[in-house]
Amino acid sequence: MPRAGQRPRLVEVAERAGVSLATASRALAGREGVSTEVADRIRRVAHELGYVANPYARTLAGGARSTVGLIVHQVDDPYFSEIAAGVIQLAAEQGLLVQICQSGRDPGYELQQLRHLIAQRVGIILISGSGYDDPRVETEARAELAAFQDHGGRVAAIGRHALGVDAVLPDNEAGGHALATHLMDLGHRRIAVAAGSAGLTTVADRLAGVTSALRQRGLRPDDLTVVHGDFTRGGGRAATEQILNEHPETTAIIALNDAMAIGVLSTLRSRRVPVPAQVSVVGFDDVSVAADLAPSLTTIRLPMAEMGRTALTLALKPRSARPRRRATGHLLVVRDSTGPAPTT
Amino acid sequence: MPRAGQRPRLVEVAERAGVSLATASRALAGREGVSTEVADRIRRVAHELGYVANPYARTLAGGARSTVGLIVHQVDDPYFSEIAAGVIQLAAEQGLLVQICQSGRDPGYELQQLRHLIAQRVGIILISGSGYDDPRVETEARAELAAFQDHGGRVAAIGRHALGVDAVLPDNEAGGHALATHLMDLGHRRIAVAAGSAGLTTVADRLAGVTSALRQRGLRPDDLTVVHGDFTRGGGRAATEQILNEHPETTAIIALNDAMAIGVLSTLRSRRVPVPAQVSVVGFDDVSVAADLAPSLTTIRLPMAEMGRTALTLALKPRSARPRRRATGHLLVVRDSTGPAPTT
DNA sequence: AGCGCTTACGTAAGCGCTTACGTACCCTAG
DNA sequence: CTAGGGTACGTAAGCGCTTACGTAAGCGCT
């Protein structure tokens, strides 16, 4: 009996198709043990009725997980929102819904969000961030995720390793290497780095690439100034102030992500430092505004949307014995923010 | 009996507190009919056990809705991601999870996402967009939402009206008026508008504000060039090309959102048109990069995050007889992209 | 003392689905 | 012709929670 103004239930479909509840369920789940003829009829009736399974009942009864949880630092940071866009798009194609959380770059709060997601019985969790800088939190998160996976949950990390879960990772080190090499090719020798928090694996890796490139060219670590700050525009501004004040001889600033690079450019502009005539600037990520900045930003392009999609793809597969890694490509995009080092 | 490696259930809490399931449920829901003493004991036990209610069971049984659905055009557009950030933050404070969908600016697809959300029994739906430009889709969406609300669902719209639901709305017309007035105060008479799709209410309203301001100053409609495009950076670039080619006398461009303004600035730069010396540019929204562009963008500030929060607040209240409206403030932020009209 | 009313709690009936198990049937082999 | 086995389907037991209803105790009142 259809109930006035209510969504149809599985019983309605079953009745109209003249079968039992179990058969209807099996047919719609595509499970075997139903003759093709009957299954077709059930599917047709379901479609006619506009039947959509109630995900709460389905999950309660132990059925398919229909939602994926996504934890990002900040949705209004383009790096994360572009990743999120990829995740959401693929999820929609698969008929999955995405539950999104922000950790606000606070490891403790991120752990809390993670627990919340687990408590909410979200079946799949994607974490897009840059590693925990608090080892205690890292340990707890790892334990939490392990337990979650043991109960059949699926997890994938984006741009972050050392979490004991599947991960999609850009080659941060190679990217850092490419940036530094590009600058040295242009004659820069006095290079400063505007880095994010020291504890983030992303920062460590990108920085390692930079230093290894310098070493390859015979530059000493002394030639490199590293200022740690926040992976935000504000962090970039603060870092630039410090660099300009303490190392006025700097001719190139490597921001370890584009958000910082935007802050760097903004501060240089207000300080009336011509870019790239006096100081060259590079970023990392290639968020979409990077091309529209003035000057347009030389940076490392990361396929953010694709990284999000890949992570979801990984999480959709059954768990493997050991965590999988997926590398992503990267590309040095040379634009107008870099130029030859000034001849003093 | 606690089951090994499983999350505790309500029964476990009830048993340990020496009460029945019903009492435990009532106590944790904060419902009356439980003595303070017993309620406290139950809450304490629940906390000790790390009990978190299973949202699927809770929803199935007809309890509280624990997730809010949010439909945006594109998560990687700062306007939407800043709104989303507000929604997600407040939702987290309330212990709600946010299901996010992208419509990709396609009304048909948006309707589909809406249906999906409804089919998934999401209890609260927030729509952040700019109205449908397809009247058939609009009608269907309206019907769908009405039925959803009749079943107890809650809906709020952000920056969009005419949907028969609660809405939080910036005063787009006043904003448009303020921008045009600002430019005319600077002596501009040849003004062009880079507008989004003609069907969007946001576009219509902002444009109406612009034209009314011109009329107030005695300018004729002929003095205004309006080019419709996409509410994106690409749309801004295309519009600028057209404006520059067809109306080279233009001294000021009003982009009806910041994304377009970024495209406008980018094209002017590559065309070597000095801003604001030759052409002034204004945007609308004040997305956070606006201040960091070169030149920094004069625009109308909208409290995006707050708009998101307000929408959720509206949706959390019981439905009122007639749709509620909440106005948001707006503020003209003058920066470096506007200056006196060139004296020909 | 007896009545009704309120308060505090327990009992049990679902919510809509999945799935283990049971059953009827047909086919083939002995 | 019967035993054994496979296939297609039905029966019913939950999943973990909310809540309508029932009940017992305590209170004031006549």
Image (spheres, coloured by chain):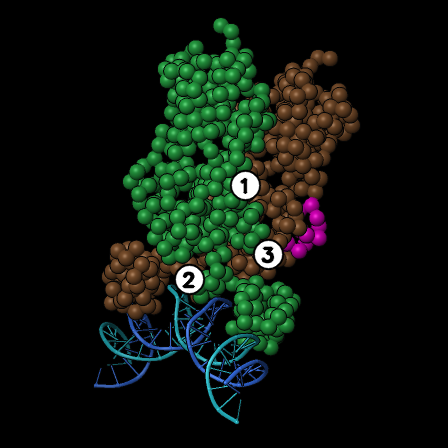
Chain colours: A brown, B green, C cyan, D blue
Overall secondary structure of the magenta section: helix
Amino acid type of the residue that numbered disc 3 sits on in the rendered structure: Arg
Q: Is residue A199 left or right of residue A5?
A: right
Identify the residue at horizontal 31%, vertical 45% (top origin). Answer: B140
Marks 3/2 in contact by CB < 8 Å: the verdict is: no
Secondary structure under badge 2? helix
Q: Are marks 3 and 2 on the same chain?
A: yes
**Depth check: B139 or A319 in front?**
B139
Q: Residue at x 68, y 54 (%)?
A: A139
Q: Is residue B330 left or right of residue A208?
A: left
Write down the quadrant of residue A15 in the picture: bottom left
Q: Which residues are magenta?
A: A132-142
User: Is label 3 on the same chain as label 1?
Assistant: no
Q: Quadrant of residue B61?
A: bottom left
Percent position of residue A206, x then y: 65, 35
Q: Is A136 inside the magenta-drawn segment?
A: yes
List the residue tagged with mark 2.
A58
The mark nearer the N terminus, 3 or 2, is: 2
